[in-house]
Image: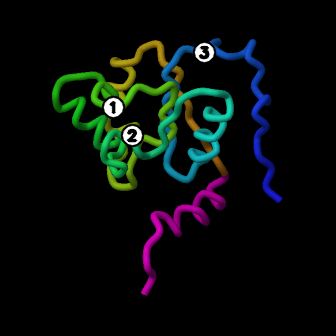
Amino acid sequence: MKEKARNDSIPISLHGKLPKPFINLGFPKMGTSSLHAFFQCGGYSSYHHRCRRVDPYYTCAKCAQESITEGLSPFAKCPDSDAYTQIDDGFSFPQLSLLDEFVEGYPNATFILTFRSMQKWYDSIRNWPPRIRG
């Protein structure tokens, strides 16, 4: 049985100790969903893969690229959030290709690098994104 975090697992006294936004620089399938759930459980706003506006398929990768193209900070055109737990869209990896822009645009942000064993990551990534196998 998979354990879930309790709503009271992060004491209020610990909130606000690290500067926002929290930006995950890790690859997909490296615990990004768990990180997203962690922030939500702690009462933080968090985007995971999709930076929703009107279009639910508007990805954080697209939003970051559009912002940079217009000469803005990477999340300038994205909805405001405390945490961005998966920025890539599986094709574009702005957390790598735009790393300098993220650091310059958010010099006081808390950058996170998630990691898991290579075997577990491989087992997870080989079935992602979901697709019909023929």
Quarter placement of the N terminus? bottom right
Q: Which residues are magenta?
A: 117-134
Gap between marks 2 and 1, in whole Å? 6 Å
Gap between marks 2 and 3, in whole Å? 22 Å
As shown in the figure, which amino acid type bears the numbered disc 2? Cys
Please give the residue where the numbered disc 2 appears in the rendered image.
Answer: 51
Secondary structure of the residue carrying numbered label 1: loop
Is residue 107 rendered to the left or right of residue 71?
right
Please give the residue where the numbered disc 1 appears in the rendered image.
Answer: 78
Residue 124, horizontal then vertical, whole percent? 59, 62
Is residue 69 rendered to the left or right of residue 96?
left
- Check whether the beta carbons of the residues at disc 2 and disc 1 lie within 8 A of each other: yes
Q: Quadrant of residue 91?
A: bottom left
Please give the residue where the numbered disc 3 appears in the rendered image.
Answer: 18
Q: Which mark is residue 134?
A: none
Q: Nearer the viewer, mark 3 or mark 1?
A: 1
Residue 76, horizontal then vertical, whole percent? 30, 25
